[in-house]
Amino acid sequence: MICFAQERNQQMERESELNEIIENRIEDLGSLLQERDRNVQFHIQEKIEDLRARKEFEDLQFKEKLKYGKFRMLRMLSKARKMVKERIDRGKKFASRDIIEEYADFASGVYAPLQRNGHRNTHINERADVLKEVEPISTYQGIEMIEESLEGSSLFETQGLRKTTPSLKKILMKR
């Protein structure tokens, strides 16, 4: 019986050692699971913060876009109101004109009339018409026309000069 009791004691010691090992493993697994849960929670919080920051940035961009669109629409509305007011004023037969205000504003039509409003500067138009009538000097006919107009003039006589150079036509014919 002593052998049987001694064997039983050894078996109980092994069982208690195994129970300790199992309990240690369970505790280690529990601590690993808790650490994993903390890491998962930490990563989830990071993702939430990143998402919140991104959404706030997108929200800020959207608000800026709305603000820009608002100012753009306000400018368009003020321009449309101004155009409607001008049409109404044009529709009146005897529209009162604020002469003092027109002369005080240096950008008004008094100082610089605009062609798009129907005002034409005749001096510039006359000069442009003269330039249209003259042929360009880059062509042979244009040079010949200028030479002919100078031959009959008293330009050479008043300066005491004679035309000694041969005609351009003769020079070009020799080539």
Image: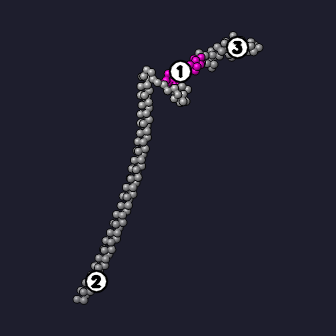
Q: Which residues are magenta?
A: 113-131
Left or right, 112 with reference to 14: right
What residue is pinned by disc 2?
10
Q: Is residue 96 visible from the viewing direction of this image?
A: yes
Residue 152 percent location from the top left of the image: 69, 10
Task: Read off the residue under disc 1.
Answer: 120
Residue to which mark 3 is pinned: 167
Q: Which type of secondary structure does the marked residue at label 2 adopt?
A: helix
Q: CA distance from mark 2 to mark 1?
A: 122 Å
Q: Residues within 10 Å of mark 1 (few under 14, many from 20)?
A: few
- Furthest residue in direction left, as rendered: 1
Q: CA distance from mark 2 to mark 3?
A: 140 Å
Q: Reading the chain from its start, which is encountered first: label 2 or label 3?
A: 2
- Three-letter code for the amino acid on which mark 3 is drawn: Ser
Q: Nearer the viewer, mark 1 or mark 3?
A: 1
On-image quarter of the N terminus: bottom left
Q: Main secondary structure of the magenta part?
A: helix
